[in-house]
Amino acid sequence: MTAFAELTSPQVAELLAGPRTPVLLLPVGAVEPHGPHAPLATDLLISAGMCQRAADRLAGDDLCVLVLPALDYGVTDMGAPFPGAISISPDTLCALIKDVCAALKRQGLDRIVVVNNHYEPAHVTALRTATKDAGVAYLDLLRRANVALLTDEFRSGSCHAGQYETSLVLADRPELVDTAVARELPPVLVDMPAAMSAGRKDFVEMGMDDAYCGTPAGATAAEGKSTFDTLTDLLVELIREVGRA
Ligand SMILES: [Zn+2]
């Protein structure tokens, strides 16, 4: 069993007294428009998918990897012009992460990794601050060494609900992607980091009239599976570091 909240309280006590070092993963997402073809929960599905894979891969290890109930909401002001966006404030996000981590740490469950796949700058800044303050690990996929391992589209910065993210959803929850619609979508090339630096505040201002950029038509489950493998490698590496600390 790898879901923390499916344990009973005595099982948590057993875990604390046992020989295996517990490492807890906190998947973070957002409820954010992802084009006309991919679900609002795309970023959470990616975070949860890599946490589950890492936990499965380390089953039977001397570390006991458990996945915490996910944090489904994030800061998603850029998607606000489109129906379905639910944004929380950076302060709320920060406070939630810190409260959850503090509650776990008080019980001796102090090895925690926050796993995020939503890259709105205010959201990422809140997570970096919260994890630093809480003294827990953050898998920062935007670090140059990590970005270098991901796909061309991800590296291009034109990757919201495009080939990269849509492929990941296809790998795990294909029924949530409208592939007939995705196949017909023209590529929309927007360098999101550059657009944000230029002061564009939401998807519409960035020229993403359908709440996506990149090339969703190129998405495949095979690419998603391969990207999940890479993401899981990175997460497992960090889990081992946290387990050794
Ligand atoms: Zn996304």
Image (spheres, rainbow, N blue to C red):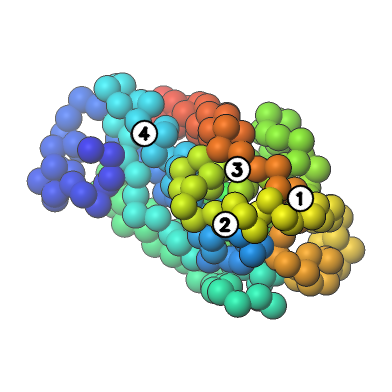
Residue 26, horizontal then vertical, whole percent: 42, 49
User: Where does the N terminus fall, quadrant-wise?
Assistant: top left
CB under 8 Å between discs 1 and 2: no
Say above or below: 228 vs 178. Answer: above
Instruction: Between label 3 and label 2, give the one nearer the viewer.
Output: 2
Asked if marks 3 and 2 touch (Cβ < 8 Å), the reply is: no
Badge 3: residue crowd in 10 Å (few <14, some 14–19, many ≥20): many
Quote the CA–CA distance across marks 4 and 1: 31 Å
In terms of secondary structure, where does tag 3 sit?
A: helix
Amino acid marked by disc 3: Ser
Residue 201 in view here: no
| Mark 3 or 4: the one toward you | 3
Q: Nearer the viewer, residue 166 or 118?
A: 166
Horizontally, is 9 left or right of 87 in the view? left
What residue does disc 1 label? 214
**Residue placed under numbered mark 2 in the picture:** 178
Residue position marked by numbered label 3 in the rendering: 167
Local crowd size for mark 4, using a 10 Å CA cut-off: few (<14), some (14–19), many (≥20): many
Residue 89 picture quarter = bottom right
Above or below, 84 relative to 197: below
Q: Amino acid at mark 2?
A: Asp
